Amino acid sequence: MVKGKYAKLAVSVLVIAGLAALGLQRWQYARQYVSTDNAEVEGVIIPIRARLSGVVVDVPVHENTRVNKGDLLFQVRDDEYQQRVEQARANYLSALVATGQGGMPGLVDSQVRSAAARSQAAQATIGQLAANVEQARSDYQRTRRLADQGVVSTQDLEAARARFSALSHQLQAARDNSTAAREGTLANQAALKVEEYRIKAAESALALARIELQDTRQASPQGGVIVHKDVQPGQFVVAGQKLLSLVSTEHMWVVANFKETQIGRVRVGQSARISVDAFPGQQLEGVVHSLVPATGARFSLLPQENASGNFTKVVQRIQARIEFRQLPKDMQQALSQGMSVFVEVDTRDSGQPL
């Protein structure tokens, strides 16, 4: 009878000690970690759209296949865009030739040089005629003095006056021609400047045509897996049409939604342990990257209206982004976006800015 009492007492003591140890363990765990199972794997999903309109001639990828950065996803018929490049190149070369930049004298450039030469010739003619006018003026004045003295005849005086008047008119005409040549030079220089702007416009058009030709081949912007492929060879597509999606596997992270009663202990830079439901028994290391400065309710379609009289307090959730420290290659390929995970953040770590 006594042995039975001692046995019951021993069992009771063991149960109480076990419960106490379990409670102590949970208390220490709660002091050290904050955890949540409201978390999932996130990543980048890139919608691939047609950049140009045309007929698709090649689609070398298939649904759920892995591609690397730079791999061809699809190609649009490019002969039309090649002709546009040739047309733009011809316009560019013709603009170069017009200004004398194509390795031979240009039309507008020749006009500028011709106008400049005419202006210089007019200036030389003005100089020569000005000297002749001064000589004619001197001859006329001398002839007039001699005529007053009766040395020369009236006919010689009229001849000297006529020569002086004719040379004066020629000088004025030469000055007018010089002004016209100078204005023509300015006009041709303005035309040359316009042609230079046309060269820039033609060069830009050629660059755009080359870009369009490159856009006929859509390459993968990064490594990932092809999903939702809705394009086949022979299909006509329009610019902006979604043809497939690329699920990136190069960079993934975890989005954890902590309760507002927990988030006060979470800091950027703290260490985290990540357990993926799909791979039990495996733990991944992470670090708190950032915290969203708003609760999830703020992004809902119908936010809660707390000003009403029937207010009910609900514990809010705040999102934290957790980056993987070193994700193994096999896990990187095995993880899928949207997988559920369990996150534990070590709050003893003071955290450091990333």
Image (cartoon, rainbow, N blue to C red):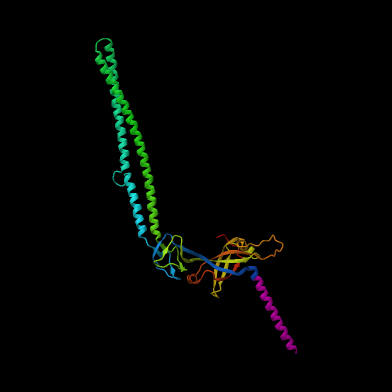
Is 148 magenta? The answer is no
Residue drawn at 33 percent across, 28 percent down: 175
Q: Position of residue 31 (x, y in %)?
A: 65, 68
Q: Residue furthest right?
A: 1
Q: Give 343 or 152, whichever is nearer the viewer.
A: 152
Q: Position of residue 137 (x, y in %)?
A: 30, 19
Residue drawn at 37 percent across, 52 percent down: 206
User: Where, quadrant-wise, is the C terminus in this rendering?
Assistant: bottom right
229 sits left or right of 301 in the view: left
245 sits left or right of 38 in the view: left
Q: How many marks?
A: 0
318 sits left or right of 191 in the view: right
Instruction: Say which quarter of the image contains residue 53.
Output: bottom left
Dominant secondary structure of the residues highlighted in magenta in the image: helix
Residue 321 vs 89, above or below: the answer is below
Q: Give 262 or 326, whichever is nearer the viewer.
A: 262
Q: Position of residue 328 (x, y in %)?
A: 49, 70
Q: Give 128 or 244, whichever is nearer the viewer.
A: 244
Residue drawn at 48 percent across, 64 percent down: 46
User: Where, quadrant-wise, is the N terminus in this rendering?
Assistant: bottom right
Residue drawn at 27 percent across, 16 percent down: 158
Residue 3 vs 149, above or below: the answer is below
Is 16 magenta? The answer is yes
Q: Position of residue 43 (x, y in %)?
A: 52, 65
Tell me where the magenta segment starts and ends, as one range: 1-28
